[in-house]
Image (spheres, rainbow, N blue to C red):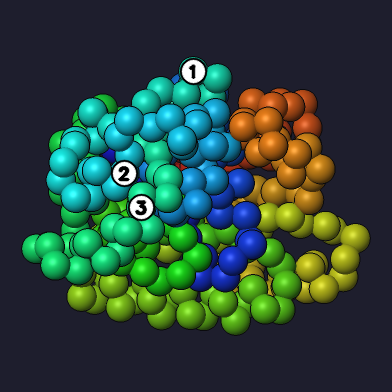
Amino acid sequence: MARIFCVANQKGGVGKTTTTVNLCAGLAKVGQRVLMVDLDPQGNATMGSGVDKRQLALSVYDVLLGSASVREAAVRSESCGYQVLGANRELAGAEVELVELEQREKRLKTALAEVEADYDFVLIDCPPSLSMLTLNGLCSAHGVIVPMQCEYFALEGLTDLVNTIKQVHANLNKDLQIIGLLRVMFDPRITLQQQVSDQLKGHFGDKVFNTVIPRNVRLAEAPSYGLPGVVFDPAAKGSQAFVEFAHEMVERIKAM
């Protein structure tokens, strides 16, 4: 049965999409069956997985509105080794259209339930705002992976996210929990980053993943080639860190 995780953080620009596509590629590399769900209308995770969002015949939009199943809409990214349930600009309209539908916050959960035997991991890339799309992701998931930079404002954003997760847990999804915090774009030479990292570990303990993703130029370049860094340059430090993170995720799931 698939383990379903949202990659979420209400603060923008913290590397959610980079984390999603590289973790998907890392998990595929270590032999896991993976589905990546793009819930952001910008479709960056779709393009970053080697899939052209403009060429999609069916997308997550069709799945949410019930006109297609996940099996029909998902496409395989041959270069990356995982399945992609892509997004494009159409998805921006789903916000309005979902309002009038029954079980509007659980449409994705219902759709994913049909394919949970087909995958080991389903990773959902959420938009930065707390929207109906993000809510669909949180209601579908067993847990949340929170990528965050070790900076002061990131700690403030984390407080908001923890409160949101508590509310969804109480009212809509009893399974939802924080699986772990992933420190990204980390530069050990910056004293503040070390201090925030220590604060995180002191407050959240083993909820902080052991793997740290370093600030890495090759990871930043990879999306312009339509690939995760793990595929674009497997030898780069950032890519190797994501493969290490994939191993840690698999081990953490076994222990749950």
Q: Give the residue type at disc 2.
A: Val
Position of residue 169 in the picture relative to residue 158 (left or right): left
Q: How far apart are marks 2 and 1 (CA)?
A: 19 Å
Residue 105, numbered label: none
Instruction: Say which label, 2 or 3, has the lower sequence index.
Output: 2
Q: Nearer the viewer, residue 22 or 127?
A: 127
Q: Are marks 2 and 1 in contact (CB under 8 Å)?
A: no
Location of residue 245 (image quadrant): top right
Residue tagged 3: 91
Q: Distance between the residues labelled 1 and 3?
A: 24 Å
Label tally: 3
Q: Give the residue type at disc 3.
A: Leu
Residue tagged 1: 78
Location of residue 197 (image quadrant): bottom right
Residue 60, numbered label: 2
Crowd tier of the residue under label 3, counting other residues whose Cα lies within 10 Å: few below 14, some 14–19, many 20 or above: many
Position of residue 10 in the picture relative to residue 76 (left or right): right
- List x then y, in percent, for residue 75: 37, 26
Query: In the figure, 22 relative to 215: above or below?
Result: above
Query: In the figure, 62 relative to 128: above or below?
Result: above
Position of residue 117 in the picture relative to residue 167 (left or right): left
Residue sitting farthest toward the right: 189
Q: Give the residue type at disc 1.
A: Glu
Instruction: Say which label, 2 or 1, has the lower sequence index.
Output: 2
Mark 1 or mark 3, which is nearer to you?
Answer: 3
Q: The N terminus lies in which quarter of the figure? A: top left
